[in-house]
Image (cartoon, rainbow, N blue to C red):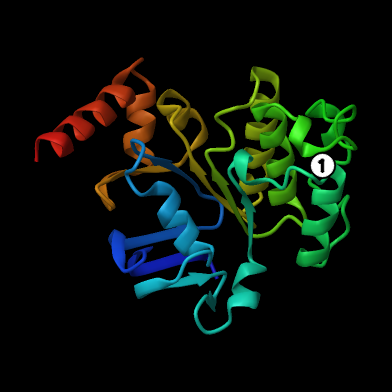
Amino acid sequence: MDEVLVVRELSAGYRGRAVVQGIDLALRRGGILGMLGANGSGKSTLLKAITGQIPLTSGSVVVDGIDLAAAPERAKAGFGLAIEPHELPPPLSGRQYIELVASIRGCAPDDLPRGDLLERLDLGRWIDRPIAEYSLGTRAKVAILAALLGKPPLLIFDETLNGLDPVAAWEVKRIITALCATGRHAAIVSTHVVEAVPALCSRAVLMAGGRLARRWDAAQLAEAGRAPGAFEESVMQALRRQAAA
């Protein structure tokens, strides 16, 4: 099966209020989807719905061929989620958190795409200290490691690349690109770093007002990437149109 994620007519929210509505989205193996949008646009709510953290009010989510509503545990085994850094449990050390996620995923704590990731992300001196002592960037690195455990078919990064230092960001992008290039994985990268999307992603979507307001396919991203600032301008124009609507 080529499609690792299929979302149909998804609506979800909190306390009876719909935050995202009418979302249709599909992602094939090998693809990297950039998810853009202003604060409050619905990006994190959509990812929480896709990953089963909040219930759907309508629609469906299928992960690696498994319907999330019908078999939530099996569906959740198909993705690795790098949660927002502030959501990590402060009392645990980084190693304890990795071990906890590994036990849930049913894999070894060192089942990662590369055996030297701790060193490459400069986590060795922090991994046994409490997460409460970590900077935003160090928390983001631990969240990313947890998402990569077991090398699941679908990788989801919810703003976690934003806080990385340049070296760590480069390493993580290399890993995402290499995994997806195998044709066995796909990734969603939710980010505010608009200029990074054309170089990393094969497709992009813009969230606004809880809906998918704009989409870019691979050809459009490639074309925008050839002209400095062109993609950023197209995103800003779409945001202005939404604000004026």
Left or right of 17? Residue 132 is right
According to the picture, the residue beneath numbered tag 1 turns out to be: 94
Rendered view: 139 above or below 19: above
Secondary element at image label 1: helix
Percent from the top left, x then y, of residue 53?
A: 53, 64
> What residue do we see at 47% from left, 55% from top?
47
Rendered view: 155 above or below 222: below
Percent from the top left, x then y, of residue 177?
A: 62, 39
Percent from the top left, x then y, of residue 2?
A: 52, 65
Going by the picture, which residue comes out furthest to the bottom?
Answer: 70
- The amino acid at mark 1 is Gly
Q: Quadrant of residue 6?
A: bottom left
Rendered view: 236 above or below 101: above
Rendered view: 148 above or below 236: below
> What residue do we see at 59% from left, 37% from top?
160
> What residue do we see at 38% from left, 42% from top?
204
